[in-house]
């Protein structure tokens, strides 16, 4: 599905949800959540080709671990953002904020080994 197709699906979901919201708020929320998950699945499908290309390009280089960490962080950020958006759509802003905070903490924890290597490199350069 191209960008135009995704935009069309998103617009259709939003219009239908807006139409249903006054009468059937729960169904409108479920429709919005289903639309978000569908578009996320489409974006993962499109990203998989780029991920395979980047992995082939980087494999065997000195930066394989860093690229893997970058992709993991990107995945964590995407899942946290979509989950938080679903929570906000359902009217749970506090839970959405907590999901975003947990996602940020996971990324920091994921990046700690990279920071340690960077500090070690800086130490060797300074001595």
Image (cartoon, grey):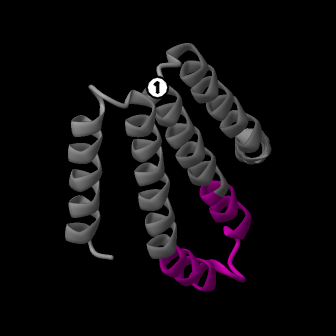
Q: Name the residue furthest top.
A: 94
Q: Residue 127, can we see it?
A: no
Q: Is residue 119 above or below residue 88?
A: below
Magenta residues? 48-71
75, 58: nearer the viewer: 75
Residue at 62% in and 31% down: 104
Image point 23% across, 55% down: which residue?
Answer: 12
The residue sitting at 68% across, 78% down in the picture is: 61
Q: Position of residue 9 (x, y in %)?
A: 28, 61
Residue 91 shown left or right of residue 117 in the figure: left
User: Toward which corner of the image does residue 29 lie, by quadrant?
Assistant: top left
Query: Few, some or many C-alpha atoms within 10 Å of disc 1 (few <14, some 14-19, many ≥20)?
Result: some
**Could you tell me which quadrant the N terminus lies in?**
bottom left
Q: Quadrant of the C terminus?
A: top right
When the figure is inspected, residue 51 is found, relative to residue 29, above or below; the finding is below
- Counting from the top left corner in percent of width and height, residue 110 is at 74, 43
Count all numbered tags in the image, as a single digit. Answer: 1
Q: Report the residue at 53% width, 83% height from top.
A: 53
Between residue 61 and residue 100, name the one nearer to us.
100
Question: Residue 117, can we see it?
Answer: yes
The answer to whether residue 116 is above or below residue 5 is above
Q: Quadrant of residue 107?
A: top right
Q: Which residue is mark 1?
A: 88
Question: Residue 97: percent from the left, percent from the top?
Answer: 55, 20
33 to the left or right of 111? left
Assign the magenta stretch its main secondary structure.
Answer: helix
Name the spot of residue 111 as percent of width and height, x first. 71, 42
Q: Is residue 57 magenta?
A: yes
**Element at badge 1?**
helix
In the image: residue 55, left or right of residue 111: left
């Amino acid at each position: 599905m191209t960008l135009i197709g995704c935009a069309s699906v998103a617009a259709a979901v939003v219009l239908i949800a807006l139409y249903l919201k006054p009468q059937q708020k729960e169904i409108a929320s479920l429709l919005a959540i289903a639309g978000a998950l569908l578009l996320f699945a489409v974006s993962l499908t499109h990203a998989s080709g780029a991920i395979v290309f980047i992995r082939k390009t980087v494999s065997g280089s000195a930066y394989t671990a860093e690229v893997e960490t970058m992709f993991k962080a990107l995945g964590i950020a995407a899942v946290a953002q979509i989950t938080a958006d679903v929570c906000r759509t359902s009217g749970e802003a506090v839970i959405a904020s907590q999901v975003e905070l947990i996602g940020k903490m996971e990324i920091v924890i994921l990046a700690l080994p990279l920071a340690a290597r960077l500090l070690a490199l800086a130490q060797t350069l300074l001595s």
